[in-house]
Image (tube, grey):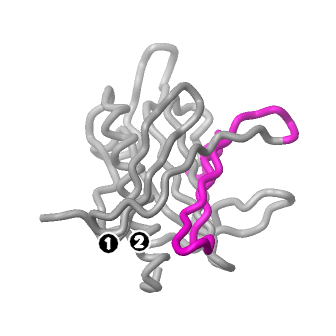
Amino acid sequence: MGRPAVHVTLEKRSSARLSSVYRGDEEIATFPGTAKDPDGSIRADMFIKAAGETLLKRSERGWSAHYILAERCLFRRNTLLELAEVRIVVSTVGRQLAAPGLIEPLGPDRFFETMAFHAWKNGKFWDADIARQLRLDSPFNLDSEDVEDQADAMHEAIVAEISSKMLSGKPL
């Protein structure tokens, strides 16, 4: 099947992420991405570069970006992708607590879900504009409750899908 036109590989190392970006089989960038925000929290800012020009910025953020009961979810990811004036938020939630120690589905047949949205400026942050959800080609929900590794992979696949569309100029 081969690799997509542009894809990102990630390796977890505590709170930092090391990433590589590929165009076809050619690695076009490798970068560490950990920085501290002024408030002391850790974030991962990643820049995809080709020929010395920044094409795409990726920021991992520590809060959920969608789902009204997200505060009850033990699993939350939020990735902001920025390319010129286009900003997209990819959000994954899962492992929702019904009561201490009792996991319940987010909805029919899903314990994890990923969604992507255009972003809007909310104070100093770019947040998900839930009225502007993107259609996804990749799988976006999981029907098992103890599959955080699969939820991470699902999130990364959707980040790669959106990144590829952004970099290729395809409509979102």
Q: Are marks 1 and 2 in contact (CB under 8 Å)?
A: yes
Task: Write the residue at 82% across / 32% down.
Answer: 40
Give, as a three-letter code, the residue at label 2. Ser
Q: Which residues are magenta?
A: 38-67
In the picture, measured across the screen, residue 134 lies left or right of residue 79, that is left
User: In front here: 17 or 162?
Assistant: 17
In the picture, measured across the screen, residue 101 lies left or right of residue 88, that is left
User: Seen from this angle, which residue lies furthest left?
Assistant: 1
From the image, tell me which residue sits under label 1: 5
The quarter holding residue 69 reads top right
Q: Position of residue 12 (x, y in %)?
A: 46, 33
Task: Write the residue at 41% across / 49% down.
Answer: 155
In the picture, measured across the screen, residue 106 lies left or right of residue 71, that is left
Q: Which mark is residue 38?
A: none
Between the residue at mark 1 and the residue at mark 2, the CA separation in whole angstroms equals 7 Å
From the image, tell me which residue sits under label 2: 164
User: In front here: 101 or 133?
Assistant: 133
Q: Position of residue 165 (x, y in %)?
A: 42, 76
User: In front here: 48 or 144?
Assistant: 48
The quarter holding residue 23 reads bottom left
